[in-house]
Structure formats: structure tokens, C-alpha cells
Amino acid sequence: MERKDFGSWLEGPPQLSNQEWPGKRLGRPESGPGSVARIGRRIGALVIDWGIAMLISMFFFKSDPTANLIIFAAMQMITVGVTGHSIGHRIFGMQVQGMDGKAIKPLTGIIRTLLILLVVPPLMSDSDQRGYHDRIGKTILVRI
């Protein structure tokens, strides 16, 4: 046996997918418009959206945690369900689309938001960086 048979920690974790980039098997480009939005943009958008919800809650509901959650959910359902992106998504140049590249329907935006509120579905993603909230809703968050 040789060292290469065991691998090295320098090689990093084993790859769960033999795709060259997230979304390749879905026909998505590696970068630019239509490519899968990466984690940094997603977190940035979430911080902005949650921050807006907290500001609204602070001014109207004295920062009530339940109000924070309801405002965040309402913003997501309305903006994503109607335009395909939240304020944070728009700032970071992303849009939620159906797998066919078309805009999602309002009901899909509502279902996707309810799954996001459960927290666990967005944390569990596949090799295309689609969380279970996107897989169940048959959506994908892409760069625009």
C-alpha cells in the first residue's frame, strides 16, 4: 500500500458529485446569468431580508420575535411569489425560477417560504446547491 491509497487531508473532503460545478447536470452555466447562486450571495440576501423585517418589527411591534417572523414570511411570500426575488435577492442579483427557467407562481412562493421557515430544508442541499425547499417546490435560485 502506498500513501496515495489512503489520500490526504490536503485533498479535502471527498466529492459527493462528479459535476464540475453546481447545476451542470441541470443544464445551468458555470457562472453568469442562469448559473446557480452560491452560498455567499444567499447568506447576504438572507441577512438583508431579515434585517428589513427586524427594522419594520422594531418600529411597529417593539421588536417582537413573532412579528419579526411574520413580517419576514410575508415579505418572502409576496415578493418571491410575485416577482421571483426578495429585496435581498434583487440586491445580490438572484431570482427564484422554476426548473424550466420561467417565473414561479405565487403558490410556489408561499410553499417555498413555509419550508424556509422550518429552517432545516434550506440547510440540507444537494450537489446542485438546491435545498429541500427548492427541490420540493421544483425551483432553483439563480443569478440574473
Image (cartoon, rainbow, N blue to C red):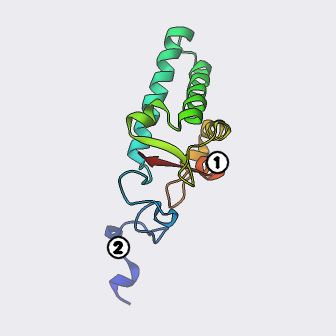
| Residue type indicated by callout 1 | Gly
- Secondary structure under tag 1 reads helix
Residue displayed at 34% across by 83% down: 3
Label number found at residue 70: none
Q: Hey, which residue is sitting farthest front in the picture?
A: 102
Of residues 55 and 31, the one nearer the viewer is: 31
Mark earlier in primary sequence (1, 2): 2
| Mark 2 neighbour density, 10 Å: few (under 14) some (14–19) many (20 or more) | few
Residue displayed at 61% across by 31% down: 77
Instruction: Tell whether 7 sits left or right of 112.
Output: left
Provide the residue designation for mark 2.
8
Residue displayed at 39% across by 43% down: 41
Residue displayed at 41% across by 63% down: 21
Label number found at residue 137: 1
Instruction: Tell whether 71 sits left or right of 46.
Output: right
37 in relation to 128, above or below? above
3D distance between C-alphas at marks 1 and 2: 39 Å
| Residue type indicated by callout 2 | Ser
10 in relation to 89, above or below? below
- Residue 9 location (% of width, % of height): 35, 68
- Residue 131 location (% of width, % of height): 56, 50
Quarter of the C terminus within the rendering: top left
Tell me, yes or no, whether the two marked residues, 1 and 2, touch with CB atoms within 8 Å: no
- Secondary structure under tag 2 reads loop
Q: Quadrant of residue 31?
A: bottom left
Quarter of the N terminus within the rendering: bottom left
- Residue 83 location (% of width, % of height): 53, 34
19 in relation to 94, above or below? below
- Residue 119 location (% of width, % of height): 59, 40
Instruction: Tell whether 144 sits left or right of 81.
Output: left
